[in-house]
Image (cartoon, rainbow, N blue to C red):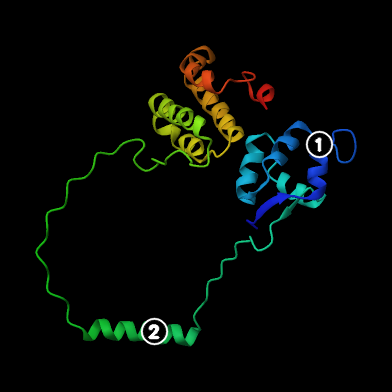
Amino acid sequence: MNAILRKSAAGLEALQSRETGTRLSARLRTLLLQVDGQKRAEQLTELAVSLGNPPDTIAKLLELGLIEIVPGSEIVEEVAEPEPAQLQRSLAGAALAEVASPPPPMASPEPAPPAAPATADSHDDLPVSAKLPEALRPVAALMRKLADKHLGLSALLLKRRISKSETEAELRLALVALRDALVKASNSEQADALLHEVYEHLPMIGLNRAQTF
């Protein structure tokens, strides 16, 4: 199931009141805020895991009635299978045609164009999401540049995540992941020094995942 999800009436009520009704943890509240009627279940599951929730958190929110499926948004893939007899006739016909047809004349080989130089970002050069607020797009571009410069090939998935960020909350999650990767590559002091320009536009509330989110 990879349908688009939205908050239910119960989910909206749970977010509006902290005193009555379903009590939500900080992580579940943050995740529920991201259910906006545009993201699919697969995206929200990935976001839930990045926030430290179990992979089945989205399913549990559905069971609790806090979120619901947008009608008509489910993706159903149907692949028609050919009848066995029809498949055999098609294969037999293709084999006979191959035997009966003379081979085409060989064309003179053309020189192959020069191969473009391979780069670490050649197959992952995604643009920054147009849905991201305009003021944050240069910040996302700077984060990608830092990941490419200091993490190399190991930063491909991280750069893709930065490019797919559509909200400030998603970009902050990507920033936490970027800082973690830079800390592993060097140390926390050097990582924060590299990210100081990013912090000017997207300040960190804390310096670890638990404090920030």
Element on which disc 2 rests: helix
Locate the N terminus and report the quarter of the image it occupies.
bottom right
Q: Can you say which quadrant of the picture contains the C terminus?
A: top right
| Residue at 53% in and 22% down | 201
Q: Residue furthest right?
A: 20
Based on the displayed image, in which of its 4 quarters is residue 153 positioned? top left
Q: Please indicate whether residue 167 sits to the left or right of residue 6 in the image.
A: left
Whole-number angstrom distance, CA of label 2 to CA of label 1 = 59 Å
Residue 211 on image: x %, y %: 68, 21
Q: Amino acid at mark 1?
A: Leu
Q: Residue at x 79, y 45 (%)?
A: 11
Q: Residue at x 57, y 27 (%)?
A: 176
Q: Which residue is mark 2?
A: 90
Q: Residue furthest top?
A: 189
* Residue at the outermost left position: 108
Quarter of the figure with residue 212: top right
Disc ID at residue 144? none
Q: Amino acid at mark 2?
A: Ser
Q: Position of residue 122 (x, y in %)?
A: 34, 40
Label 2 crowd (10 A; few <14 / some 14-19 / many >=20): few
For residue 30, side relative to residue 116 (left or right):
right
Vertical position of residue 16 compared to residue 147: above or below: below
What x and y, as percent, mark residue 60? 77, 48
Residue ID for mark 1: 24
Of residues 157 and 20, the one drawn nearer to the viewer in this rendering: 20
| Secondary element at image label 1 | loop
